[in-house]
Image (cartoon, rainbow, N blue to C red):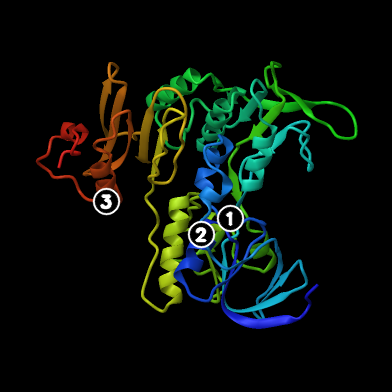
């Protein structure tokens, strides 16, 4: 066990996820400390590993020097040192917190600090591999949570041959990104894959076997109904990992508070990715993490750069098992029978005074809706035919004013009206 203090590194990054790995690729001589034993990987593609489409080495990120399997236990701001659980102490000139987030474990009866057998979070590669090892054709699986992560997990499990039930507390699937009509189309697609979808239902607890090692047997709903379950996947969202920052006395609200240079309340410490809160927002998106890492790389190099927030497009592509996944925007999911292409950006839920333009083509399975607030795009959802998504997303991301003489109906044409 090493106990000596190592020479100060110019930049030390705590966390070897997508943000930390991106920063290491942009800044020479960075020391990266990561808890996971795996090399950095693309977390967005975990569902592809679960479905058996990819092996773990396929989703590996470009090689980076990472001290793997080491956890930082304390930050000494006065002496600019980080203390690790292997006894090593690393000095820094600049420290970057890229600690990511933890899966939210809901307050369910039967769910303690130690998860019962058969209960799986779905956040890391180890989570994914454990779940893949447990799945077999015909196994009864319940996914709790109908956001992007839950939809990804349910699709992958169905592709593995599991009998899948997806339980969502909200009114419809992917409430953060989709309006009700698009969510209904997504639901019908999942049901076509054999996934049983329940919305507006609250999970009360887990029924487990008795004994020294409890194992899940059913998921109990608030109305008393029980869903048989040999596997239960917790996809209830994530929470920023801020423990190190709090213990070090940094300003923490929902996440670790940073300014436009991704600097915390300590001028020698920065934060990026899921753990960072900028202008009151914790993004929790891969696109935002990468954008923050790129800006911070410029800052650390002494070049003028500012982070002004991320306007992220979420895109899902669910195809037949033989199809090749398409990567775009902040998210990718690839699925089974029939095809589904869906993109969402901004706020697709209109406010009083907004203009809403909607086109639904039931014959072709296409749906487009955009929300205009004043003279700017506020958001939109495109389902089936995404020909206009590039132009619309660029207009929204650039926050450009719409031409005063343009008919809003033209926004739904394939060139986005331009």
Task: Give the residue at x 37% y 50%.
Answer: 311
Residue 66 lies, in percent from the top left, at 60, 66
Decide: is 371 above or below 328: above
Categorize mark 3 by other alpha carbons within 10 Å: few (<14), some (14-19), many (20+).
Answer: some
Report which residue position mark 2 lands on. Answer: 19
Task: Give the residue at x 81% y 72%.
Answer: 1
- Distance (Cα) linking label 1 and label 2: 8 Å
- Distance (Cα) linking label 3 and label 2: 25 Å
Q: Which mark is residue 135?
A: none
Decide: is 363 above or below 43: above
CB-based contact (under 8 Å), mark 1 and mark 2: yes
Q: Is there any visible trace of residue 347 in the rendered image?
A: no
Dividing the picture into quarters, in which one does residue 9 lie? bottom right
Left or right of residue 395: residue 93 = right
Task: Give the residue at x 59% y 58%.
Answer: 39
Report which residue position mark 1 lands on. Answer: 100
User: From the viewer's perspective, is the residue at label 3 or at label 2 nearer?
Assistant: 2
Task: Compare marks 3 and 2 and give the one earlier in the sequence.
Answer: 2
User: From the viewer's perspective, is the residue at label 1 or at label 2 nearer?
Assistant: 2
Left or right of residue 235: residue 377 = left
User: Which corner quadrant holds the C terminus?
Assistant: top left
Q: Which mark is residue 399?
A: 3
- Distance (Cα) linking label 1 and label 3: 29 Å
């Amino acid at each position: 066990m090493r106990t000596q203090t190592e020479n100060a590194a110019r930049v030390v990054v705590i966390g070897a996820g997508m943000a930390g790995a991106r920063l290491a690729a942009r800044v020479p001589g960075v020391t990266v400390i990561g808890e996971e034993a795996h090399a950095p990987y693309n977390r967005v593609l975990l569902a592809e590993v679960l479905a058996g489409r990819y092996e773990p080495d396929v989703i590996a990120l470009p090689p980076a020097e990472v001290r793997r399997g080491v956890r930082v236990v304390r930050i000494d701001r006065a002496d600019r040192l980080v203390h690790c659980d292997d006894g090593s102490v690393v000095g820094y000139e600049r420290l970057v917190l890229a600690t990511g987030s933890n899966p939210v474990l809901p307050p369910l009866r039967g769910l303690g600090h130690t998860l019962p057998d058969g209960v799986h979070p779905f956040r890391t590669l180890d989570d994914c591999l454990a779940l893949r090892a447990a799945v077999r054709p015909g196994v009864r699986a319940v996914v709790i949570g109908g956001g992007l992560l839950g939809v990804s997990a349910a699709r992958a499990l169905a592709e593995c041959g599991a009998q899948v039930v997806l339980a969502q507390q909200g009114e419809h699937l992917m409430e953060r990104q989709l309006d009700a009509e698009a969510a209904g189309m997504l639901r019908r697609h999942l049901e076509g894959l054999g996934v049983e979808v329940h919305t507006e239902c609250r999970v009360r607890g887990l029924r487990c076997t008795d004994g020294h090692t409890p194992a899940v047997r059913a998921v109990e709903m608030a109305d008393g109904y029980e869903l048989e379950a040999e596997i239960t996947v917790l996809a209830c969202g994530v929470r920023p990992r801020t423990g190190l920052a709090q213990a070090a006395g940094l300003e923490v609200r929902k996440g670790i508070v940073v300014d436009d240079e991704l600097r915390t309340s300590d001028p020698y410490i920065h934060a990026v990715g899921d753990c960072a809160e900028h202008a009151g927002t914790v993004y929790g998106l891969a696109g935002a993490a990468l954008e923050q890492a790129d800006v911070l790389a410029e800052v650390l190099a002494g070049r003028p750069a500012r982070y002004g927030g991320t306007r992220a497009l979420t895109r899902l592509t669910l195809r037949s098992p033989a199809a090749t996944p398409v990567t775009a925007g902040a998210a990718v999911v690839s699925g089974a029978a029939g095809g589904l292409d869906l993109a969402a950006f901004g706020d697709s839920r209109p406010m009083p005074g907004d203009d809403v333009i909607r086109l639904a083509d039931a014959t072709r399975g296409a749906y487009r809706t955009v929300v205009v607030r004043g003279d700017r795009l506020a958001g939109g959802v495109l389902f089936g035919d995404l020909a206009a998504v590039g132009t619309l997303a660029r207009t929204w991301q650039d926050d450009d004013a719409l031409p005063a003489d343009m008919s809003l109906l033209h926004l739904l044409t394939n060139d986005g009206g331009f």
